[in-house]
Amino acid sequence: MKIHEYQAKEILRRFGVAVPRGYLATTPLEAEGAAQQLGGGICVVKAQIQAGGRGKAGGVKLARSPEEAHQHAALMLGSVLRTAQTGPEGQEVRKVYVEEGCRIARELYLGITLDRERGRVAVMASSEGGVDIEDVARNHPERILREAVDPLTGLTPYQARRLAFGLELVGESVDAFVRFATALHRAYAATDASLAEINPLVLTVTGEVLALDAKMTFDDNALARNPEIAAMRDPAEEDPREADAKDHDLAYIALDGDIGCMVNGAGLAMATMDVIRLAGGAPANFLDVGGGADEEKVEAAFKLLLADPHVKAVLVNIFGGIMKCDVIANGIVAAAKQVGLGIPLVVRLQGTNVELGKEILAASDVLAIPADDLGDAARKAVAAARAA
């Protein structure tokens, strides 16, 4: 789960990470008032969307007075920012964050994530702050410093100092960086984060180390034990279909193909997409209804697939274990009646109550194309999508 910059800074502040003062605003007047609360001097107005590259897209503006903050907010709010991470459709700006200015001496990078190859949390730092870290990793990997964190000790002060020396920090800035990095790691570990990224991390002319920007993402599977973080979810920033899927406890990811997939089990769903590719088609989504879904959940999943205008055919691939084939069949019939199925439907059922499931589909008005196995189902779905 992603959150906004202002939310990430609220979390980091609680763990002792140094962040500039700032206030959220949803109207130009609120932005002007926020600038006045910050002292009326130089401040920065930042569009709050869950994507990087805001500055290049005009989503970060310097204001020298509250009136100028009002003007910047008026232009940003309601506009659509298009960055490399949003894609061509962009994201609408619904709120801005007004933050106090600072005198920057250097811009650095600091990030924490999971190194899956080593099975350890990795802390990364670079002197190339304020730019896309992916470009640095690709073109100048030697400029990225790394420290693997022992889960028993956490990030130790000597590891943080080694990063500070690698960034060529000196004097009191070294101690400030150590405090900052260790606090950031505490926040990362305590909140079940999957990423905590500060870009840029700035060194001010007075030697302070501050998070000028902050990005945090969280493990969805751990949100149940972090309800205060789960409450920060912003459905307006998500794909509407993916947001609807979360509301129904469905694992759904939109893709760019034309064959809708409904499967039970993540592994089987991945295999289904692979076989569709092998047959020459393109899946429109990943959708796992889970092992214990009821008819209502299946119906919601089916409606989700049909809501995608790019879908030309639907492939249902169910192996009935905990999930019974007759439950899937009843859900499909109910959903088809409500939405009016106008595209080909290929169904492959195996497992518990498979014959009953097939009988339910055969006795209904739903024109389902039966398939004997996964390969057969994929070929029939691809052919149906091409003919549509």
Image (spheres, helix red, strand yellow):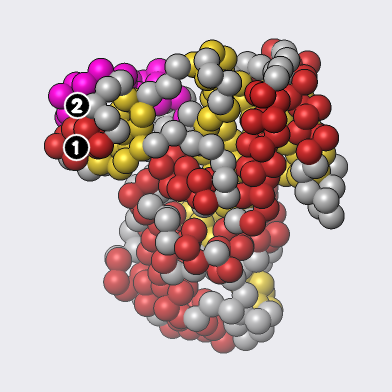
103 horizontally vs 145: left or right: left
User: At which x and y percent is residue 211?
Assistant: 52, 32
Is residue 378 positioned above or below 43 on the image?
Answer: below
Which residue shows up at 69% across the image and 42% down it?
Answer: 182
Q: What residue is shown at x 45% (from left), y 17% (from top)?
A: 103
Task: Tell me: residue 115, above or below residue 285.
Answer: above
The numbered dot on residue 33 is 1
Q: Is residue 66 left or right of residue 344?
A: left
Q: Left or right of 327: which side holds 195?
A: right
The magenta segment: 52-76
Front-lying residue, 56 or 167: 167
In the rendered image, which residue does mark 2 sit on? 66
Residue 207, compared with residue 314, is above or below; it is above
- The type of residue carrying mark 1 is Gly
Gap between marks 2 and 1 measured at Cα: 7 Å
At which x and y percent is residue 237?
A: 37, 46
For residue 109, what is the image quadrant?
A: top right
Q: Is residue 58 visible?
A: yes
Most foreground residue, 162 or 243: 162
What amino acid does circle 2 point to?
A: Pro
Label 1 element class: helix
Answer yes or no: is residue 370 visible. Answer: no
The reply to whether callout 2 and callout 1 are in contact (CB within 8 Å) is yes
Locate residue 129, reporting x and y percent: 58, 19
Q: In the shown orientation, is residue 29 left or right of residue 168? A: left
User: Mark 1 or mark 2, which is nearer the start of the sequence?
Assistant: 1
Q: Residues within 10 Å of mark 1 (few under 14, many from 20)?
A: some
Q: Nearer the viewer, residue 338 or 218?
A: 218
